[in-house]
């Protein structure tokens, strides 16, 4: 059985590939290496470098490989840049999904697990967030992911494709093997940026907004370990291959931490004091996002293994100190 992983050289994609290969699956990766890294590609995966919007290229991959299911991570995922370049996000994310679904339809591939996001909810009216909560994205990133979910829904009705959209909260941490972890260029995510301070690659961490309606005025997020996310993707593809119906499922720990709490936890893990600069809000950021994760437990039998924030940050710290 071959699984096609689009974006398998990226952060969450690479961790999912490692887990798939550990479990004995054959994996085909498509990645244009625009934001992915060669060093994150599993040596046993078959790798095609190319852009999924390139129809000829993508169809050739489907022609050559016997694909049973698809896991789709290949998309732009930065809130800040999406606010500045919305059309780039519509092109890569929404048009990319259209090309992918067309190729799947043409080749009779009917199952897709999709990397969606809590950003589809926007500013939530209730916490924790349930899957049937209102979706009203506050940025183009969330808007494009929601459009991609809806595209799959209509393809399910018309062509009998089935999907699981996994709406993850804040992915973080690294594989305990120390070989792969969170790499972005430029880096914009909170935990890697915080750790750059004790790694002496950055002077201080900026805190974006201190006047949010939260306990300490900084944004609250639900941080979920990347290996727990990888595990959920594999459970989801098995769920679809077993003939089960489409689902939209949250992936989070169900617990929220403020930006200042994350900085404090990082200080404990690294045993260093981390210089902090208080700044203005970043455009497009909701105040508080925390998941209700019971649907993932019930439907997929998924339970996060990494529930301690210090342990999660420690896996990231282990990865960065190994690479130095
Ligand atoms: N954040 C921050 N300083 C930074 C980067 C992020 O204060 O240098 C905040 C950001 O405003 C958000 C949280 O940390 O409230 C998580 O941001 P990240 O970019 O890691 O993930 P997102 O929530 O955008 O998916």
Image: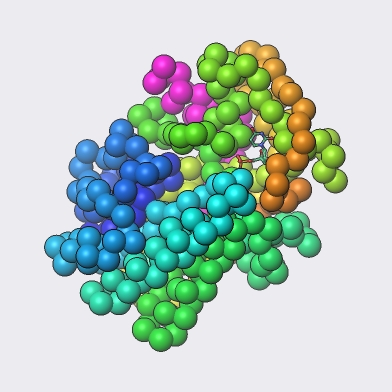
Q: Write the residue at 68% across / 58% down.
A: 138
The percent position of residue 160, horizontal first and vertical second, equals 37, 83
What is the quadrant of residue 61 in the picture? Answer: bottom left
Chief SS of the magenta region: helix
Task: Please give the range of residues in magenta.
Answer: 302-324
What is the quadrant of residue 210 in the picture? Answer: top right
Q: Is residue 23 left or right of residue 81?
A: left
- Quarter of the image for the N terminus: give it: bottom left
Q: Is 183 rendered above or below residue 156? A: above
**Residue 316 inside the magenta-drawn segment:** yes
The percent position of residue 219, horizontal first and vertical second, equals 74, 42
Q: Is residue 196 left or right of residue 230?
A: right
Q: Is 41 rendered above or below residue 64? A: above
Tell me if I can see residue 292 in this picture: no
Q: Write the residue at 45% across / 73% down.
A: 152
Residue in the foreground of this view, choosing between 8 and 254: 8
**Residue 55 inside the magenta-drawn segment:** no
Picture quadrant of ligand 1: top right
The percent position of residue 142, horizontal first and vertical second, equals 59, 59
């Amino acid at each position: 059985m071959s699984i096609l992983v689009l974006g398998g050289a990226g952060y969450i994609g690479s961790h999912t590939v490692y887990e798939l290969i550990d479990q004995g699956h054959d994996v085909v990766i498509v990645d244009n290496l625009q934001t992915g890294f060669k060093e994150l590609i599993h040596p046993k995966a078959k790798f095609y470098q190319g852009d999924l919007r390139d129809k000829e290229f993508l169809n050739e991959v489907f022609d050559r490989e016997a694909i049973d299911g698809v896991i789709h991570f290949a998309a732009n995922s930065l809130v800040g840049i999406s606010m500045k370049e919305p059309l780039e996000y519509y092109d890569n994310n929404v048009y990319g999904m259209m090309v992918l679904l067309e190729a799947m339809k043409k080749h009779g591939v009917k199952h897709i697990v999709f990397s969606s996001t809590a950003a589809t909810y926007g500013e939530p009216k209730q916490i924790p967030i349930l899957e049937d909560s209102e979706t009203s994205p506050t940025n183009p990133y969330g808007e494009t992911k929601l459009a991609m979910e809806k595209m799959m829904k209509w393809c399910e009705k018309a062509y009998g494709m089935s999907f699981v959209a996994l709406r993850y909260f804040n992915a973080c941490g690294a594989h305990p093997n120390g070989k792969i972890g969170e790499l972005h260029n430029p880096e914009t995510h909170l935990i890697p940026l915080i750790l750059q301070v004790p790694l002496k690659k950055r002077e201080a961490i900026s805190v974006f907004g201190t006047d949010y309606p939260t306990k300490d005025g900084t944004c609250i997020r639900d941080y979920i370990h990347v290996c727990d996310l990888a595990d959920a993707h594999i459970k989801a593809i098995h769920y679809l291959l077993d003939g089960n119906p489409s689902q939209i499922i949250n992936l989070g720990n169900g617990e929220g931490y403020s930006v200042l709490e994350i900085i404090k936890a990082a200080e404990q893990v690294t045993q260093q004091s981390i210089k902090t600069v208080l700044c203005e809000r970043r455009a497009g950021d909701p105040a508080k996002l925390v998941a209700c994760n019971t649907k993932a437990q019930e439907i997929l039998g998924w339970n996060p293994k990494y529930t301690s924030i210090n342990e999660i940050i420690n896996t990231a710290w282990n990865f960065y100190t190994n690479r130095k």
